[in-house]
Image (spheres, rainbow, N blue to C red):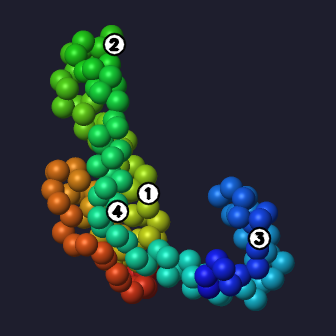
Amino acid sequence: MSKRGRTPTPALDRLTTAERGQLLSELLLAQPELVDQAENRALALLVVADIHEVAKSIEWTLREADTDQLAFRAGRVYGRGYIHENEPASEILAESLQLDLDDLARRSALGLHDAASQIGLACYGASLGDEPLSKTARCSPTPART
């Protein structure tokens, strides 16, 4: 529905993400008949993974990585001896990718393996500096293997 056709909701429009989450939880507790509809909409959101958006996010994160951290972690480090710059660079890369890897695990746990694979490809491609393999990944929910 367009913004023009809906009833104005000034309070709802100004809620923070955390407040919206709390409100959704309270509504679902108060009206359990909405749980199935909310679950279906949540799956519809999670089933689509835009590999370019994930890759752009990773690229931005890597470009914004603090080079002072690399300098601080490499070289002579008290208590550890000499640390080659490759080791802290790998650590910084892993830390930068952690949010996307957590998203990958979250979608995989829901059985959305195709979407998780697309995120994994974006992470892998970004870590190599490669262009993502496809523009948008759309996949259907695949039941998780038990």
The part of the image, by quadrant, that contains residue 140 is bottom left
Spatial CA span between label 4 and label 2: 41 Å
Say which amino acid is labelled 2.
Gly
Disc assigned to residue 123 = none
Say which amino acid is labelled 3.
Thr
Say which amino acid is labelled 1.
Asp
Q: Is residue 76 left or right of residue 26?
A: left
Spatial CA span between label 4 and label 1: 16 Å
Q: Given contact means CB atoms under 8 Å apart, are the residues at marks 4 and 2 in contact?
A: no
Residue at 40% across, 76% down = 48
Neighbours of disc 1 within 10 Å: few (<14), some (14-19), many (20+)? few
Disc assigned to residue 79 = 2
Report which residue position mark 1 lands on.
Answer: 102
Mark 4, secondary structure of its residue:
helix
Spatial CA span between label 2 and label 3: 58 Å
Q: Earlier in the sequence, mark 4 or mark 1?
A: 4
Where residue 109 appears, x then y in whole percent? Answer: 46, 71
Q: Is residue 117 visible?
A: no
Neighbours of disc 3 within 10 Å: few (<14), some (14-19), many (20+)? few
Report which residue position mark 4 lands on.
Answer: 53
Q: Nearer the viewer, mark 1 or mark 3?
A: 3
Q: Given contact means CB atoms under 8 Å apart, are the residues at marks 4 and 1 in contact?
A: no
